[in-house]
Image (tube, grey):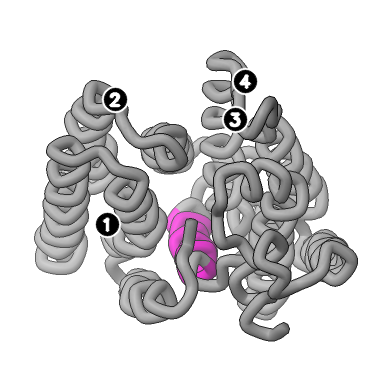
Amino acid sequence: MLKGAFKLLRISALPSALADVLGGSALALAALPWVPHAHFAREKLPWLVLTSVGIYLGGMGLNDLLHRHKDAALNKPRPIVTGAISVEVAALLTSLLYAMGLGASVFAGCAVLALVLALATVAYNALALGKVERGQVRLSAPAALLGVATLAFARGLHVLLPLYALSGGQGAPFGAVSIVFTTVFAYFWLVTLVSLFEDSGGGRRALALVQAALLPVIFAVPLWSLAQGDRGHPLIEDLLPMVIAATLYLWLSYALLRARQEPTPRNLGRCVGLGIRGECLMMAAFALALLPQDPAWGAGAMLCFPAAALLSKWVSPT
């Protein structure tokens, strides 16, 4: 049953959520001078991690719970469908994770944003539910696109959790905050757009759009940071983030090119999985560009990528 629980929660996607905490913490520290009377209390980090883990994995569990009839119609080997875990146990585990995440957010100082984040994950799973009719799954285009936007919005909020915790709910008039949120939103909007074709295949034109749009999205924060001038750590804050961003884009481009040549559910699923793991590299590039004087945050986010890759060999992230 333990492996069934790990599959239910798609544990291999968790390192990308932890990378968000690291990247978001680097953003928070970089924003400190622009937030009045704020300080970053490192003792909040364990609570931030618990908040992230609880809501992220809770959302994964809820996805399988709500979508079990759709998964069965599509013959997906999800743990509830295969009987690896019961509906009752899955519901209990999902509820406990959400409760843990929301409870921890109170101590982390980001309860309001965490509640909005949790509600966004529920909204996405409801929007992506669709209807099963005669063994076929039908999902309206408006609901699908709204679901994509909702999930992207949730991921952007997730990265802002550390900033919200340190500022006590106040906004930070810091240019990087808006560009980081917008970039994360755009990145996951594109990745989730690919996932719309994961069940049925196809979508060559959409894949071409995604490949083209990912280029400015992935490089946005490193280029913005580079344009600020007064660079004291050119190797760490300029060269290394650009190398990481280029590596991520090339990997994703190769996967998308293969999927365009043969748009099967398997190839599309690989693109989505790589896109989720790629969040680790994107957070590493962001952290190094924004906080070069403390590169441990970027290094930690970068280490999340191989961890996610190793776990994905055991449990699929999609």
Numbered badge on residue 289: 1
Distance from disc 3 to disc 2, alpha carbons, whole Å, reads 22 Å
Q: Is residue 288 visible?
A: yes
Q: Give the amino acid at mark 1.
A: Ala
Q: Give the amino acid at mark 3.
A: Gln
Picture residue at 13% right of the left edge, 50% below the top = 254
- Mark nearer the N terminus (1 vs 3): 3
Numbered badge on residue 143: 4
User: Which range is magenta?
Assistant: 14-30
Q: Give x and y (percent) for residue 37.
A: 67, 54
Going by the image, does 316 lie left or right of 132? left
Picture residue at 25% right of the left edge, 31% below the top = 207
* Residue at the bottom extreme of this rendering: 2
Q: Nearer the viewer, mark 4 or mark 1?
A: 4
Distance from disc 3 to disc 4, alpha carbons, whole Å, reads 17 Å
Picture residue at 75% right of the left edge, 66% below the top = 108
Q: Which residue is mark 3?
A: 136
